[in-house]
Image (tube, grey):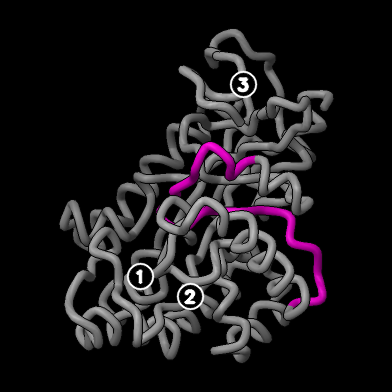
Amino acid sequence: MKPRRYGPFPYSPIIERPKQRWPNGARIAVWLIPNIEFFALDEQVPAAAGGGGKVPDIPSWTVRDYGNRIGVFRIMDVLDRYKMRGTVALNSELCAEHPQIIRECIKRDWELMGHNESNTRRLNSVPPEDEARVVKNTVETIAQASGRKVQGWLSSGLNETWNSLDHFVDNGLDYIADWCNDDQPYQMTLDDGRTITSIPYTFQLNDKPAFEKHNRTAEEFDTMIRRQFDVLYREGDTQARVMAIAVHPYIIGVPHRIGALDSALEYICKHEDVWLATGAEIAAAGRELAGA
């Protein structure tokens, strides 16, 4: 899209939207996004991701490798307990580096979103002429490894360029999760009239800023999830809401934090009219409600 003062969508205050619910009368759609990422040992972990040391950055790298060796399987165990499927924000290089993780995701019918090739290279940091290749290669690599069409995208660091939306649509993606400005899905219209669905992601219920930036305890993160759910569940009685929970295997997957996720999901699942959904399911239902 061309540079603009506001997004490629109209301003839409929540108080002016219709009263609707999700399929089967659900008040709230809850989706959980494990960010399963690959950091190359011979590349610098970006300072924005908590690294920035000289290569090899052993402390930053091994913390993340723990998530892929152990933490991710703890998350899988918790989600299995509540019959919840994850929607993975996946670095495509992980398909070749750690195919065992991909097999476990497919076994559980988890959805795989594009999340760049590697978390050491973000879309706004690659040469402009290379961005289209990165998106295309990411989507094609994940599709080949999983045998499934890639429907969604979450950019590493949520970083886009003015051209990113066009590249996403060019590669057949149905939805994106970079724009954290709503509690409902909405349609984005590109300059040429093509559309893509934006679905709610989260900066707040995200273990990375919660623990690394705001120094929350596991108990506080559990409480944050519960309080977010309570408000959205109440509002969803008349107007459907989406609740995203973003986690990283190397953060929530460590022994002293995993219980917070387990506790929060147990609380959520005790309520009626809760839809445990994937990103693609939420995007499709949002388009249907909007008549798109």
- The picture places residue 155, in percent across and down from the top left corner, at 51, 54
- Please give the label number shown on residue 9: 3
- The picture places residue 162, in percent across and down from the top left corner, at 53, 37
Residue 70 vertical position relative to residue 81 in the rendered view, above or below? below
Mark 3 vs mark 1: give the one in front: 3
Q: Which residue does the numbered mark 1 point to in the structure image?
A: 252
Q: Main secondary structure of the magenta part?
A: loop
Q: Is residue 180 magenta?
A: no
Q: Which residues are magenta?
A: 146-165
> Which numbered disc, 3 or 2, marks the residue that appears first in the sequence?
3
> Which element is circle 2 on?
helix
In which quadrant is the C terminus drawn?
top right
Q: In the shown orientation, is residue 56 left or right of residue 117?
A: left
- The picture places residue 118, in percent across and down from the top left corner, at 48, 71
Q: Quadrant of residue 195?
A: top right
Residue 122 vertical position relative to residue 175 in the rendered view, above or below? below
Mark 3 vs mark 2: give the one in front: 3
Circle 3: residue type: Phe
The answer to whether the residue labelled 1 contacts the one labelled 2, judged by CB atoms less than 8 Å apart, is yes
The answer to whether the residue labelled 3 contacts the one labelled 1, judged by CB atoms less than 8 Å apart, is no
> In this rendering, does residue 238 appear at all?
yes
Residue 40 vertical position relative to residue 191 in the rendered view, above or below? below
Classify mark 1: residues with Cα within 10 Å, few (<14), some (14-19) or many (20+): many
